[in-house]
Image (cartoon, rainbow, N blue to C red):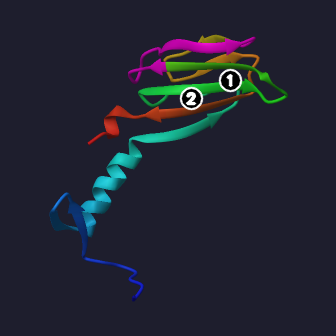
Amino acid sequence: MKKLLSVDYVRGLLGNNSGKISFGLLKKNLLLKLSSVGIKKEDGGGAGICMPNVGIIFAYNSNNPTQYIVYMYIRNIGDFAIRIPLTSNELTLGAQNNQGTSVVNGADTQICLYIDKDSLP
C-alpha cells in the first residue's frame, strides 16, 4: 500500500451504502466540530477561564489535591457566568467579573472543558 500525503476524496461506508466526500469538506467539518470544544488551564485567579459559553471546571490546590471544587458554568459574552457547584472539599467559589474571570478561593489550578456555542456548525 502506498502512503499518500494528500487526497482529493475520502471513501466512507454507512450501513450498506458507500460513497465519497471531498477531503476539503471533510476537513472543514472536522475542524468546525473540533473548534467547538476545548480545554483551558488557568491558575486559581481564573483569568478568562469562563470565556467560552458552557463548561465544567475542575479546580484544586496542587499542594493538597484533597482540596478541590468541580463546577459548571453557563455564560454569554459580556455577562457574568452562572456558576453551579457540583462537588467540593474545602474550596469555594470567589469573585468573578463579566470578562470571564472566575476565582476559586484556595485553588492554584483550574482546568476547564468547554463548548463554544458560537463555533458550533
> Which residues make up the magenta segment?
73-91
Q: Does residue 81 show up magenta in the picture?
A: yes
Left or right: 28, with 14 as reference point: right
Residue 88 seen by the camera: yes
Q: Which of 96 and 53 is in front in this view?
A: 53
Quarter of the image where one finds residue 58: top right
Quarter of the image where one finds residue 15: bottom left
SS category of the residue bearing label 1: loop
Circle 1: residue type: Gly
Residue depicted at x 47% and y 33%: 114
Residue depicted at x 48% and y 27%: 55
Give the quadrant of the C terminus: top left
What is the CA distance from the residue labelled 1 to the residue labelled 2?
A: 9 Å
Q: Nearer the viewer, residue 68 or 74?
A: 68
Mark 2: give few (<14), some (14-19) or many (20+) Cα within 10 Å. many
Residue depicted at x 41% and y 27%: 53
Q: Nearer the viewer, residue 78 or 5?
A: 5
Left or right: 119, with 59 as reference point: left
Mark 1: give few (<14), some (14-19) or many (20+) Cα within 10 Å. many
Left or right: 50, with 17 as reference point: right
SS category of the residue bearing label 2: loop
Quarter of the image where one finds residue 48: top right
- Outermost bottom residue: 2
Q: Name the residue under label 2.
A: 49
Is 10 situated above or below 82?
below
Is 53 situated above or below 41?
above
Residue 4 horizontal/vertical position (percent): 38, 83
Give the quadrant of the N terminus: bottom left
Q: Nearer the viewer, residue 46 or 22?
A: 22
Q: Does residue 3 show up magenta in the picture?
A: no
Q: Name the residue under label 1.
A: 45
Residue 46 seen by the camera: no
